[in-house]
Image (cartoon, grey):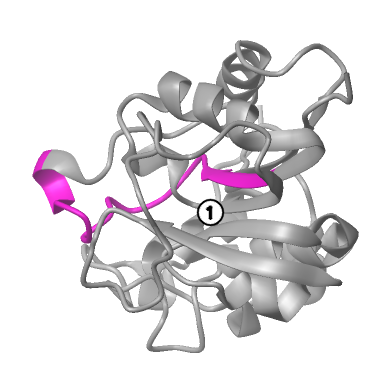
Amino acid sequence: MTENRPVNFGDLRRLTPISDVWGTDRGGPLDRYYIHNFLERNRKDITGRVLEIKDPGYTRKYGVDVTREDVLDLDPANPSVTILADLTKADAIASDTFDCFVFTQTLHIIYDSRAVLRNVYRFLKPGGVVLCTVPSVSRINYEDGGLESGDFWRFTQASVRHLFAESFPPGSFEVEGYGNVLACMAFLYGLSPDELTREELDYVDPWFPLLYCVRAVKPVR
């Protein structure tokens, strides 16, 4: 029997987060560390005609030989938008249109995620790639409707695999989990990546993922 030693919680013995805006006021959200690394590793996929949600920031930062950048949003007031559409319908988007879809931290705020991925598969060109990230652990999104209608899902490895397998054929996608219990705790408290070491951030514990990254390819017919 092991002895239960007292834990010194220090600044973490509190009922509210240190930052309630995901650490944007402390240097940036911690989950972006994993998202940026994922996009950097797969930047060769961000090429040709590229679609992104709300703004083209990642396309411009990581894209290689991008011929056209498109931005999708529901909000007609968004000055960056080039495609005004609902991803659960997206009938206005022609099939086989995009070489890449940079689709980060968005699927969880759309209730009908199955319809979204069916449309994503349809409007990718053969050989096109979607680079998708989804949360396993996160505070409730305070944007896009907040508690009532702006945040629906958290994902596990099993749910991500089953969900993508409904639209993408076997062997066409890879799912990677990132994070550990310390990274999850730090993210919920609103700490930034700079407040953890690289060793702490890079340690992957499959039982305590912070998020999942998915690279899915539409096969060439």
Q: Is residue 6 above or below residue 36?
A: above
Q: Is residue 143 left or right of residue 133?
A: left
Residue type at the position of mark 1: Cys
Q: Is residue 6 visible?
A: no
Q: Residue at x 51, y 39 (%)?
A: 136
Q: Which residue is mark 1?
A: 184
Residue 209 is situated, as x and y percent measured from the top left of the image, at: 62, 42
Which range of residues does the magenta coloring cover?
131-148
Membership of 142 in magenta stretch: yes
Work out whether residue 139 or residue 47 is closer to the camera in this orientation and state it: 47
Membership of 168 in magenta stretch: no
Residue 97 is situated, as x and y percent measured from the top left of the image, at: 65, 42
On the rendered image, what quadrant is the N terminus found in?
top right
Q: Residue at x 27, y 42 (%)?
A: 151
Residue 11 is situated, as x and y percent measured from the top left of the image, at: 38, 78
Residue 131 is situated, as x and y percent measured from the top left of the image, at: 69, 47
Q: Is residue 172 left or right of residue 87?
A: right
On the rendered image, what quadrant is the C terminus found in?
top right
Q: Is residue 200 above or below residue 73?
A: below
Work out whether residue 83 or residue 204 is closer to the camera in this orientation and state it: 83
Q: Is residue 164 above or below residue 101?
A: above
Residue density around tag 1, few if under 14, some if 14–19, many if 20 or more, within 10 Å: many
Q: Residue at x 40, y 31 (%)?
A: 91
Where disc 1 sits, the SS reads helix
Q: Is residue 76 left or right of residue 148?
A: right
Work out whether residue 162 or residue 219 is closer to the camera in this orientation and state it: 219
Q: Is residue 203 left or right of residue 36?
A: right
Work out whether residue 181 or residue 75 is closer to the camera in this orientation and state it: 75
Q: Is residue 112 visible?
A: yes
Where is residue 198, by image quadrant?
Answer: bottom right
